[in-house]
């Protein structure tokens, strides 16, 4: 029984080694980058749709608020004319509009929170994607033959705001000493 277990483990180990050699890490990395770019593009599209929907909701809310202001004037007229039935109908419409406006406000707040979360995720994913692209470029340079002349343009390098701030402060300090 122990011999069979050992042979099984040996066979599995050899199969894993063969699979590792078959899979090319640089191709897997490129595929991962393509998948991440597709997911990123989908999130950007969703962000644009959310912004558009927020714009539409804001317009509808503005229209509702304008109608409410108009209804207040109409209610004043109804009360002055002692039209009780007409006043009650108008109050019913006003209450419906107020409730509808409240629902729109809730929807707008929900969309705004979703958009904030999505924007934060997009920023994090953008940083990760740039990092993966840089790693892929480094791997491509490392795996290419060093005797070949490399005529490609330099890779785009991601520089954080913190790096810019530090360099700015150093330059400012260097110039103040002069």
Image: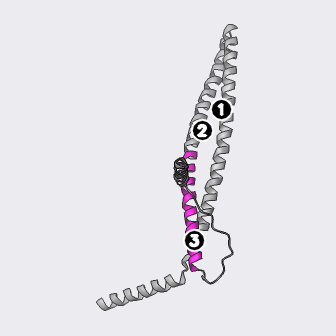
Q: Residue at x 66, y 49 (%)?
A: 48
Position of the N terminus by quadrant: bottom left
Could you tell which of marks 3 and 1 lies nearer the N-terminus?
Answer: 1
Quarter of the image holding residue 7? bottom left
| Cα distance in 3D space between marks 3 and 1 | 48 Å
* Residue 34 colored in magenta in the image: no
User: Dot 1: what SS?
Assistant: helix
Label 2 packing within 10 angstroms: few (<14), some (14-19), many (20+): many
* Residue 116 colored in magenta in the image: yes
Label 1 packing within 10 angstroms: few (<14), some (14-19), many (20+): some
Task: Specify whether residue 148 is in view.
Answer: yes
Instruction: Tell which of 56 and 85 is nearer to you.
Output: 56
Which residue is label 3 attached to? 136
Mark 1 and 2 residues: CB-CB less than 8 Å, in contact? yes
User: Dot 3: what SS?
Assistant: helix
**Furthest residue toward front:** 178
Could you tell which of marks 1 and 2 lies nearer the N-terminus?
Answer: 1
Residue 26 in the image: x percent, y percent? 57, 76
> Does 6 sit above or below residue 70?
below
Residue 152 in the image: x percent, y percent? 68, 73
Q: Residue at x 59, y 34 (%)?
A: 105
Could you tell which of marks 3 and 2 lies nearer the N-terminus?
Answer: 2
> Does 173 sit above or below residue 4?
above
Which residue is label 1 attached to? 61
Q: Residue at x 60, y 38 (%)?
A: 108
Label 3 packing within 10 angstroms: few (<14), some (14-19), many (20+): some
Which residue is label 2 attached to? 108
Residue 115 in the image: x percent, y percent? 58, 46
| Cα distance in 3D space between marks 1 and 2 | 9 Å
Segment tinted magenta in the rendering: 115-143
């Amino acid at each position: 029984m122990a011999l069979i277990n050992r042979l099984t483990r040996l066979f599995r180990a050899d199969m894993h080694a063969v699979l590792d050699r078959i899979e090319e890490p640089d191709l897997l990395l490129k595929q991962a980058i393509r998948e991440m770019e597709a997911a990123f593009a989908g999130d950007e599209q969703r962000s644009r749709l959310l912004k558009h929907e927020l714009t539409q909701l804001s317009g509808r809310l503005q229209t509702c608020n304008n109608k409410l202001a108009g209804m207040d004037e109409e209610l004043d007229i109804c009360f002055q004319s002692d039209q009780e039935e007409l006043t009650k109908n108008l109050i019913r419409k006003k209450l419906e509009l107020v409730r509808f406006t409240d629902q729109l406000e809730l929807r707008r707040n929900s969309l705004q929170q979703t958009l904030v979360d999505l924007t934060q995720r997009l920023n994090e994913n953008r940083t990760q994607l740039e990092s993966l692209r840089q790693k892929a470029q480094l791997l491509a340079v490392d795996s290419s033959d060093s005797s070949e002349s490399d005529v490609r343009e330099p890779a785009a390098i991601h520089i954080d705001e913190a790096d810019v701030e530090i360099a700015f402060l150093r330059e400012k300090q260097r110039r103040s000493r002069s």
